[in-house]
Image: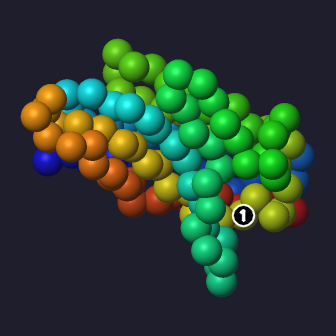
Amino acid sequence: QVQLVESGGGLVQPGGSLRLSCAASGSIYNIYAMAWYRQAPGKQRELVAVITGTTNYADAVKGRFTISRDNAKNTVNLQMNSLKPEDTAVYYCNAQLQLSRLLPVSEYWGQGTQVTVSS
């Protein structure tokens, strides 16, 4: 069974920084994409950043957040700088992967980690 475990959330003041990490474990054949989503209270879950061979970011975080990936360790990180109160949300790790070359690509989610930006 595949597990995605996030860490690094917490409370930070506006203008501060946080680094989120996510580790995928289990019998994984290949990971095609890893991403971070977030969901604020009363809002739909939205894509923050995704990394495949390239990276893509939501307009709201461009220039402030950086996604990176360690393929050897099956981890993905999200460095968040210049945080704003509107970045407050539960952040979820997402992976699109195969358990074997014979199986289709499936999507997996972490349990979420809370990020709160407040003075």
Q: Residue at x 37, y 55 (%)?
A: 109
Q: Nearer the viewer, residue 52 or 93?
A: 52
Mark 1 is on which residue type?
A: Thr
Residue at (52% x, 43% y) in the render: 35
Q: Specify the farthest residue to the top.
A: 72
Q: Position of residue 93 (x, y in %)?
A: 47, 49
Q: Is residue 112 left or right of residue 45?
A: left
Query: SS at mark 1?
Result: loop
Residue 107, percent across and down?
33, 51
Please give left or right for residue 50 compared with residue 1 in the image.
right
Q: Quadrant of the C terminus?
A: bottom right
Res 16 seen here: no
The residue that disc 1 covers is 88
62, 52: nearer the viewer: 52
Q: In the current view of this chain or complex, which residue is farthest to the bottom?
A: 42
**Taking 58 as reference, is 81 above or below it?**
above
Q: Does 92 sit left or right of 16 as displayed?
A: left
Q: In the image, what residue occupies the spot 15% across and 29% down?
A: 101
Residue 40's quadrant in the figure?
Answer: bottom right
Give the tally of numbered discs. Answer: 1
- Categorize mark 1 by other alpha carbons within 10 Å: few (<14), some (14-19), many (20+): many
- Locate residue 80: give its quadrant: top right
Residues 53 and 45: in front is 53
Q: Position of residue 37 (x, y in %)?
A: 57, 55
Query: Percent from the top left, x then y, of residue 102?
Result: 10, 34
User: Residue at image x 44%, y 35%?
Assistant: 33
